[in-house]
């Protein structure tokens, strides 16, 4: 076997400095960053929104079968 293959160097130096490898490594870095952000977002507890933000979605009339029920 070739000495370079035994040393772990499989690709020539010109390939590692080419545009294709640069774009591929940028995509891998972006994918890793997004995956890490999503994993951290799952660990962080949910923040509860105050009731002031939810007032606009409250119904004016009840849609219950009981007309005098809560809104």
Image: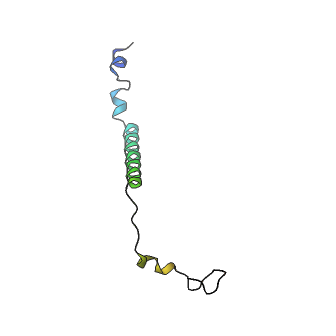
**Which residue: 64% across, 86% down?**
67
**Residue 70, percent across and down?**
56, 83
**Which residue: 67% across, 81% down?**
65
Specify the quadrant of the image occupied by residue 63.
bottom right
Specify the quadrant of the image occupied by residue 48.
bottom left
**Residue 64, percent across and down?**
63, 80
Specify the quadrant of the image occupied by residue 62.
bottom right
Q: Nearer the viewer, residue 52 or 37?
A: 52
**Residue 71, percent across and down?**
56, 82
The number of numbered discs placed on residues in the rendered structure image is 0
**Which residue: 36% across, 26% down?**
12
Q: Nearer the viewer, residue 66 or 50?
A: 66
**Residue 34, percent across and down?**
40, 50
Q: Nearer the viewer, residue 3 or 20?
A: 3
Q: Is 46 situated above or below 6?
A: below
Q: Residue furthest top?
A: 1
Check the picture and name the quadrant holding the N terminus.
top left
Q: Is 3 situated above or below 67?
A: above
The color scheme shown is rainbow
């Amino acid at each position: 076997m070739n000495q370079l293959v035994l040393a772990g160097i499989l690709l020539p130096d010109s390939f590692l400095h080419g545009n294709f490898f640069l774009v591929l490594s940028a995509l891998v870095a972006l994918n890793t960053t997004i995956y890490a952000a999503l994993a951290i977002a799952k660990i962080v507890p949910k923040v509860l929104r105050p009731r002031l933000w939810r007032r606009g979605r409250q119904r004016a009339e009840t849609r219950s079968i009981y007309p005098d029920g809560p809104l």
